[in-house]
Amino acid sequence: MKACLLVRPAPVETQPLQYTEAPVPEPGSGEVLVRVLCCGVCRTDLHVVEGELTPKKSPVIPGHQIVGVIERSRSGASRFPVGSRVGVAWLHKTDGICSYCRSGAENLCDHPEFTGYTVNGGYAEYVVAPEQFLYAIPENFSDQQAAPLLCAGIIGFRALRLSGIQSGGKLGFYGFGAAAHVAIQVARHWGVDVYAATRDARHQRLALDLGAKWTGGTLAEPPVQLDAGIVFAPAGEIVPAALKVLRKGGTLVLGGIHMSPIPSFDYDLLYQERVVRSVANNTRQDGEDFLKVAAEIPIETRVQLFPLQEANRALNALKNDAIPGAAVLQIAS
Ligand SMILES: [Zn+2]
Ligand SMILES: [Zn+2]
């Protein structure tokens, strides 16, 4: 099969992904072989490719927002018939037995496997995955539209939940990439006003287009105090700036898997029961709940398509804020 292999992490400008031939993977017990139709490009892929996340497997095929069709099942896999359209997301597998898994927090599992990081992902024509971790893709989404829902969408949804925002509330977004452009549609659906701080003019326009009340530069102060905030951009200097406009008791959610160092700040910014918390991965329940809401709204993702062999170019565009919405690799039709 054709695949994009990462042999050694390096700046994406040096084209670290090699478009090459790789063996079609063999599904193990309880696993299915998925023929990949398309795969969304996530900022986490950029962190994997550039080595900000410690390499766990080498070489590795990145990609964890996979829409595909089940080609073949191994024994023990009968949840979806062959030919079903399914989604493969970041959480490849958990151990199912640690204290986190047993208490409904499988996103924090002690022994997790992650698609496109600890196991091969979807920048390829085929991928294997345990069928218990697959998602059914709601029918009203095209393959390309659905791909960014599988990480950008689900993680944004978990971040929204953790922010505690309620209908009628005022919510700040810091950075306005793929996750934010989906999350704003859920927030608007819940009757939440969104204030979007982001450096790129195209992203500001997209935010206004999707119903943001206000947009400004990354460190610009919104005109109102906010009930909650979500930091999507991986820039630690946003944290004190965002706390400055957060009301007493408000929550600031850090949505990324990686962030540059957070500068020290005055305790006054945190005092009065303000909460800063991160989001780590998601549970399958988050994914199921989100896809249901996404189909009801319905969410409209803005996607820019790239062929598989141009994955380096797609990541480079993402790094330079040049994608309004989400980048998606088109792999088959
Ligand atoms: Zn576990
Ligand atoms: Zn992701």
Image: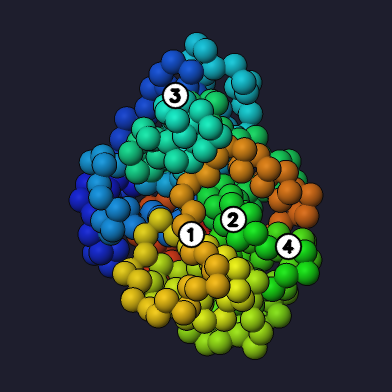
On screen, residue 117 versus residue 128, left or right, reads: left
Residue receiving disc 3: 97
Could you say where residue 86 lies in the image, as x and y percent from the top left?
Answer: 60, 35
Q: Report, in whole angstroms, how far the alpha carbon at label 2 lies from the one at label 1.
A: 8 Å
Judged from the image, the secondary structure of the residue bearing numbered disc 1 is strand
Could you say where residue 165 lies in the image, as x and y percent from the top left?
Answer: 68, 63
Say which residue appears at 62% left-offset and 23% top-offset: 80
Vertical arrangement, residue 138 with respect to residue 155, above or below: above
Judged from the image, the secondary structure of the residue bearing numbered disc 4 is loop
Q: Report, in whole angstroms, how far the alpha carbon at label 4 lies from the one at label 3.
A: 34 Å
How crowded pointer 3 is (Cα within 10 Å; few <14, some 14-19, many 20+) is rated as few
Say which residue appears at 55% left-offset and 26% top-offset: 132
Judged from the image, the secondary structure of the residue bearing numbered disc 2 is helix
* Label 4 beta carbon within 8 A of ligand 2: no
* Label 3 beta carbon within 8 A of ligand 1: yes
How crowded pointer 2 is (Cα within 10 Å; few <14, some 14-19, many 20+) is rated as some
Quadrant location, the C terminus: top right
Residue receiving disc 2: 162
Say which residue appears at 56% left-offset and 61% top-offset: 179
